[in-house]
Amino acid sequence: MVLKNAVKPEFTPELSEVQVGFIPLTDCAPLVVASKMGFDKKYGIKIKLHKEASWAAIRDKLISGDLHAAHALYGMVYGVELGIGGQQKDMSVLMTLNHNGQGITLSNQLKNQGVNNGNDLSSFLKQQATKLTFAQTFPTGTHAMWLYYWLASHGIDPLRDVKTIVVPPPQMVANITTSNVAGYCAGEPWNARAVYDSVGFTVATSQDIWVDHPEKVLGVTADFADLYPQTCRAMVMAVLEACRYLDVMENRPQVADLIAGPEYIDAPNQVIHDRFVGNYDNGNGRKWHDANAVKFFNQGKVNFPYLSDGMWFMTQFKRWGLLKSSPDYMAVASRVNRIDIYQQAAQALEITVPEDVMRTSRLMDGVVWDGHNPDAYVDQFGIRY
C-alpha cells in the first residue's frame, strides 16, 4: 500500500489539557521532554503526566477515560482492541515512541551455575525437576513477546518448559533479588539496575532479538481519536519534536538527569544514563557501545505506525494461543494505526513519511517478517499453539 500526499491541516486542538499516563521506564522520555520542555505549548495543549504503577492501570484508565492518552506497550493496545484477557475497547495507535532499548535479565544464581546464554539455559532447564519462573510485564505486551520469542528460538517452550508471571517493571529487580523469579524481560533501566545491584546480568537485549523493533506507542481509545482529532495531531507534533530532540545524543545526558528524578523513574542517574547513550555492560564480562540502543526518531522512521508492526503482534498472539483463530490482520491494523493523523502531523513538521505502510525485518532466528502472509508466518514456527 502506498500513501497519498496529505494536505497540511490547520491545527486547533479541541482540548487545552491532555491527561497522559506513563510507566517509569527510560522510554517514557519523549512524553517527559514534550511536557517539561514546552513542545506541547507550541501546539496549543498542555500534556499533564500521570505516573502509573502498572500496565494494567494504564489499560484500565485509558478504557475508563481517566487518561486521555498513554505511553503504552504496542501489544497491550492490540490486546485491548482484540479483547484478549479483559474488556474489549476499540483502540488507536497515534505514533511509535521508540525502537529497541529493552532486555532479558537472568539471575546471578543462574550465572553461577554456568548459565551464560540461551543455549546454556536450555540445557540447564532439562536437568531441573521443577520449572523456573520468569517474569514479563503484561500478558499481550512487548516484553512477553520478546521473552517468548527468545526462549523459543533456543528450543524452550515458554508455555510448558518454564512458568511465567506478570510483574510491573519497577518491581522486577526486587523479585530477582529475592529469587521469586530466575529472570525477566523488561524495559530499561530495570535491566541495568539488576547489573548495578549485582543481582542479575543481561543475557540479551531486545535489539538482539529484532533490530529496530517497535516498542512503546502513544495510545488512545478510538473514541478519543474520533472525538478529538486535532488534539491528537497536536500531541503527535509535540512528541515528534521531543523525539527529534532526543535523537541528538548530546541532549541525552540532560534528559537522563531529568527522568531520573522521583516524579519519573526514580533511579540513580548512572543506571539510566549509560544504556540511554548506548554504553552497555551486561554484568557478565562484556562491555560495548550499542549502535542500536534505544532510538526515538531516526529521521521519522521510528515514529511512523507501520501496519506490519501492529500485524506482527497479532501473529504472536495467534502463535501463543491468545487468539484461537486468525484475525483479519490487515483490516485490524489499518483500523488501529492512525496513519492519517500521524501523516498530517509529520508533514506539518516537514518530517518525511514513508511511502510504504509495511516494512521488512529479519529477527534473531533468521526468519523474515514483512507482513504479507501472516498465517504462513505463524505456521512456520516449530513451537506454537
Image (cartoon, rainbow, N blue to C red):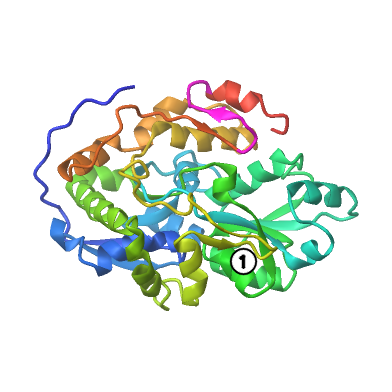
Placement of 271 over or under 307, stated as above or below: below
Q: Residue at x 18, y 60 (%)?
A: 45
Q: Is residue 137 visible?
A: no
The image shows residue 40 at horizontal and vertical percentages of 20, 60
Q: Nearer the viewer, residue 326 or 312?
A: 312
> Of 95 and 163, which appears nearest the observer?
95
Which quarter of the image is occupied by the N terminus? top left
The picture quadrant where one finds residue 280 is bottom right
Residue 370 lies in the magenta stretch = yes
Count neighbours of disc 1 (C-alpha within 10 A) and say few if under 14, some if 14 to 19, many if 20 or more. Answer: many
Residue designated by label 1? 172
- Residue lying at 41% horizontally and 44% vertically, measured from the top left: 89
- Magenta residues? 364-373
62 to the left or right of 271: left
In the rendered view of the protein, which quadrant contains the C terminus? Answer: top right
- Front residue (pair 255, 94): 255
Q: Could you say which quadrant of the image residue 135 lies in?
A: bottom right
Q: How many marks?
A: 1
Residue 354 vertical position relative to residue 122 in the rendered view, above or below: above
Assess whether residue 158 is covered by the magenta stretch: no
x 70%, y 53%: residue:
164
Indicate the position of residue 155 as horizontal and vertical percent values: 76, 39
- Residue 347 percent location from the top left of the image: 19, 39
Please say whether residue 310 is visible from this viewpoint.
yes
Looking at the rendered structure, the kind of residue marked 1 is Met
- Whole-percent x and y of residue 194? 63, 69
Secondary element type, mark 1 = helix
**Left or right of residue 95, residue 145 in this image:** right
Which residue is located at x 52 percent, y 21 percent?
373
Side of 259 relative to 287 (left or right) = left
- Which secondary structure type mostly characterizes the magenta part of the structure? loop
